[in-house]
Image: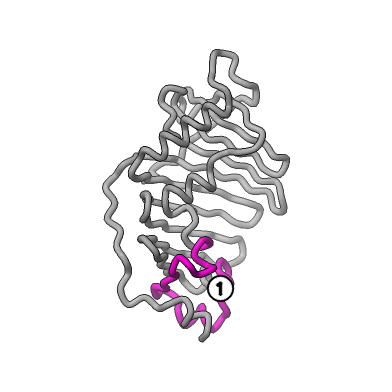
Amino acid sequence: MGLGVCAVVSASAAAIAYAAPSPLALRSSIVAAIRAQHSLHYISTGRDVDRRWKVIGDIGRVRGVQQLTIRERGAGVERETVVVVPGTAYLRGNRAALHDHYNYSAAQSSRYANRWISIPRGQFAFREVAGDVTLPFFLADYMPRGRLSVVRGDVDGRKAVGLHTDTGLFKFTVYVRSVVRPLPIAVTSVQYEGASSKGQFNLGPWNRHLRVRARSHAVPVAKVLNS
């Protein structure tokens, strides 16, 4: 989970009438375009029945940083920062984030609130914490798969081409400026399972210089879990 101003996206559910690549060909070109990049800056916003969230990320091939804020109706605000470097993820969250988002006990959440916690890649919690904080994870999580279609739409008032999937549980669309410029500029999602949620990403600029380093004096996650 700069972002600047979030993209305003509208789309037609109908397949594009003009000449367009097949969905699989468009997906392959988008994947290849992303893999050729060094870094991505993005902002994601979303909401469901009781919550609103915002994520700001600067991610590269093996390292990245992400800041997440969740505001829940009738509850507090969850704030967390995740840093990923080769082999390790670092998590720093307030008490609400540690307790409600990561299911740490009340005592653990109070004791380690706003302190860096280190999670090595082999630890079971690594994927949960590091998800979307490097380009490979982002690609794995946000590229449509399954039954695909090519749609047309507008992103911030400009025409765009979308790769769309609808599984019955969620709808998901990745937009590019054109089929000859297949680098993503926005992502939209609608999830129906459980509490219906909507989200969107504003993607770019790409290839900013990243300065992400390991966090010193971090508490090993094994120590947190055993406390």
Give coordinates of residue 171: x percent, y percent.
64, 39
Above or below, comparing residue 204 to residue 118 in the picture? above
Above or below, comparing residue 214 to residue 204 in the picture? below
The reply, left or right, for residue 7 in relation to residue 166 is left
Residue closest to the far front: 122
The reply, left or right, for residue 70 in relation to residue 35 is right
Q: Is residue 117 magenta?
A: yes
Residue on which disc 1 sits: 99
Q: Nearer the viewer, residue 149 or 160?
A: 149
Q: Secondary structure at mark 1?
A: helix
Q: Residue at x 31, y 42 (%)?
A: 207
Q: Nearer the viewer, residue 182 or 49?
A: 182
Quarter of the figure with residue 103: bottom right
Q: Nearer the viewer, residue 89 or 43?
A: 89
Give coordinates of residue 89: x percent, y percent.
42, 65
Above or below, comparing residue 70 to residue 199 in the picture? below
Residue closest to the far top: 18
Q: Nearer the viewer, residue 83 or 146?
A: 146
The amino acid pointed to by label 1 is His
Neighbor class of circle 1 (other Cα within 10 Å; few <14, some 14-19, many 20+) is: some
Quarter of the figure with residue 213: bottom left
Q: Residue at x 59, y 56 (%)?
A: 51
Q: Is residue 138 magenta?
A: no
Q: Residue at x 32, y 69 (%)?
A: 215
Above or below, comparing residue 188 to residue 75 in the picture? above
Range shown magenta: 99-128
Quarter of the figure with residue 153: top right
